[in-house]
Image (spheres, helix red, strand yellow):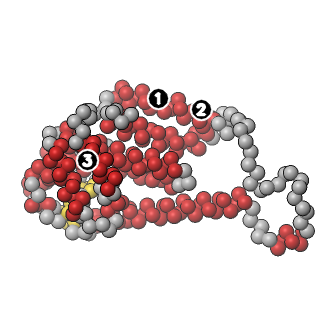
Amino acid sequence: FRRANASLRHVLWVAGLYSLLLIPLTSGLLPTLDIPLFRIDLMGGGNGLEPSVPTSVQSSVMEWDTPAILMILYLSGILTVLSWQCIGRWYAFRLRRKSSTIDQSDLNLRLQQLQEALNIRTPVRLLRSSLASIPFSTGWLRPAIVLPEGVESWHASVQESVLIHELAHIKRNDILLRILAQAGCSLHWINPLAWYGFGRMMMEQEIACDNQVLWAGTKPSDYACNLLTFAKTRRGYLDFALTPLGRRSELKHRLMEILKPSRSRAPLPSGPLLFFLALVWIHLRPCSMIN
């Protein structure tokens, strides 16, 4: 699995995550297959061994049963996760509102050329922010690329690699996929597999965009040095909400993928993509039927 094409691994992680999140939805559309494995009685009754409790004592006890308490805890977890995710979205929105448009003709001309090369027809704004320490892309319907201050002094190759990476996110609709995955994780917050799949999906998105930069002709060692430079200039704040560049383990994984010479960086053809999606659907049907 680790030797597979980066695009193929991204498809596998995305398909696996969404197959996990779609099981409750598809279970209502398919016939049910009851499998008597075990039964847990949350109410603790049914064995006839409990002493009888007077009605006056029962009325003085809180009338919430165990399923209601579990439901309240579950909904509280959903609200907590959604609030945490909204903080990250608010931070990205705040950075975009306080950003200024870059009027430098060279950067905008290079952006238009790269859009044409990547076949991106959606208009993309180029912004500059004094609050951002790392470049990032934001917006799904109205995409924009936000660059830190001093971008004009960067080397031309660094500017090009950053623009290609962020344009690759926009072309692949990674922003929309992250929003949908975050919504799914908020519903499945108690499931560690959902969080692990979400983290892997984000990492594979970054690796796929890194491969797009290398596919365009950037030298792997130079691109790795650029990533290390951005990691050193990262000031903290809430940059975790923008890109998985801050955590050391994630940066190390990206650098290893960039510097690995045997890795195939070609885009994934449509044939294997449809094949693996069909496998996911075959896996999803029986899992959704089990009760």
Image side of residue 182 versus residue 63, left or right: left
Question: Which corner quadrant of the image does residue 218 belong to?
Answer: top left
Mark positioned earlier in the residue sequence (1 or 3): 3
Residue 286 circle label: 2
Label 2 Cα crowd, 10 Å radius (few <14 / some 14-19 / many 20+): some
Q: Quadrant of the C terminus?
A: top right
Q: Position of residue 129 (x, y in %)?
A: 22, 66
Q: Is residue 167 shown to the viewer in this render?
A: no
Residue 255 circle label: 3
SS under mark 2: helix
Q: Which residue type does callout 1 highlight?
A: Ala
Label 1 Cα crowd, 10 Å radius (few <14 / some 14-19 / many 20+): few
- Whole-angstrom CA distance, mark 1 to mark 2, is 13 Å
Mark positioned earlier in the residue sequence (2 or 3): 3
Which residue matches tag 1? 278
Query: Relative to residue 79, is residue 198 depicted above or below?
Result: above
Say which of 139 and 149 sits in front: 149
**Residue occupying image coordinates x 49% and y 61%:** 81
Q: Which residue type does callout 3 highlight?
A: Leu
Q: Which residue type does callout 2 highlight?
A: Pro
**Residue occupying image coordinates x 37% and y 27%:** 272
Q: Quadrant of the N terminus?
A: top left
Residue 218 circle label: none
